Image (spheres, rainbow, N blue to C red):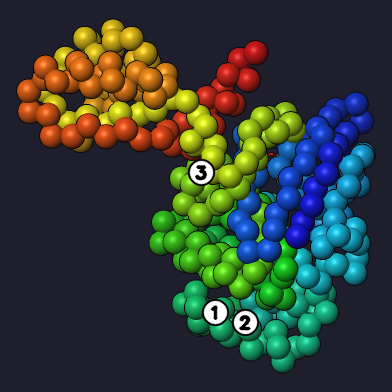
Amino acid sequence: MLKVENVTKYYGDFKAVDDLSFTVKEGEIFGLLGVNGAGKTTTFRMIIGLLDKTSGKITLDEEPIDYSKTDYIGFLTEERSLLTKLTVKEQVIYYGILKGMDEKTILERLDYWLKRFRIESYKDKKIKELSKGNQQKIQFITSIINEPKLLILDEPFSGLDPINVEQFMEVIKELKKKGTSIIFSSHRMEHVELFCEKLVILVHGKSVLQGSLKEIKKSYRKKNIHIKADLDAEKISKTKGVLSVDKTAEDYIVKIESDEYIENVFKEIKNCKNVTEFRVEDPTLNEIFLDKVGVLYEN
Ligand code: ATP
């Protein structure tokens, strides 16, 4: 289990990470979220020991993370760090050996992953000859070649097309099933929402929202009501507790302050014609994120 306890990082006088604490258990997928400059990369670098923390404690299975632990950690860095003059095979062997693996095992696993990502033919190609998406696949393969206990993915989906995002997600879910602790950052809330169970939202290095995705959504008071009907949007928007009414291609989305106003909206809708749907949903993570981050940035 990864444990981050009260970690703070200063760059000179600037506080980049502020008293951050969280845990990632075995087989758990944890999301570290925040806008640009929130402190995600700094946190990752402190976890793997690339950067000294100013204060606090970070442990993996109750022990501090030092050089002896790096063989069990995989890290996909945000600034892609492939040696572009090497071939795919040379690159992966290089990383694998750095992680204490023998060449035979590296090559066996490399063949498996190249096949899995349907890029077997690139094995002897130079990295610089590959497209960005395929370079990213190679970087992902290097980060998991050692079957890490802890896998850190800094913006793993940036620059990937939807099909490749799907492929990456499938592999990440499989690693989770095998017990890997996975921590990743992303700006794309829909990715986080799809498979992350716990998360922390950072604003200026400080946690502003933290916990399980389910609980965060439940405890968030605002709700969205999806309505299909011939409704008078203006009238609904004046109903007590209604924050906004938006028309989409499919339906109306009525945002309300909290559960207690559902009935008010329902009463209004009863007078409308052609009502075929009235569905109350939790807001999306993106809405919660914008609400939390937006409000805090305005202050
Ligand atoms: P992004 O999503 O853009 O990658 P991030 O959440 O990963 O952002 P960090 O890279 O951790 O954010 O940066 C956090 C803050 O610390 C930023 O304000 C950044 O400018 C600052 N920072 C990062 N590295 C240094 C450094 N070496 N010296 C001084 N300040 C730094």
- In depth, the one of 45 and 23 nearer the eye is 23
Q: Amino acid at mark 3?
A: Lys
Residue position marked by numbered label 2 in the rendering: 110
Residue position marked by numbered label 3 in the rendering: 214
Quadrant of the snapshot with the N terminus:
bottom right
* Residue 84: quadrant of the picture: bottom right
Residue beneath the point at 41% across and 62% down: 163
Residue 286 vs 3, above or below: the answer is above
Question: Any mark on residue 89, and which?
Answer: none
Q: Secondary structure at mark 2?
A: helix
Residue position marked by numbered label 1 in the rendering: 114
Asked if disc 1 and disc 2 are in contact, CB closer than 8 Å, the reply is yes
Left or right position of 66 against 106: right
Q: Quadrant of ligand 1?
A: top right
- In depth, the one of 133 and 1 nearer the eye is 1
Q: Secondary structure at mark 3?
A: helix
Quadrant of the snapshot with the C terminus:
top right
State which mark lies toward you, 1 or 3.
Answer: 3
Left or right position of 54 against 122: right
Query: For the residue with label 2, is its CB less than 8 Å from the closest atom of ligand 1?
Result: no
* Residue 276: quadrant of the picture: top left
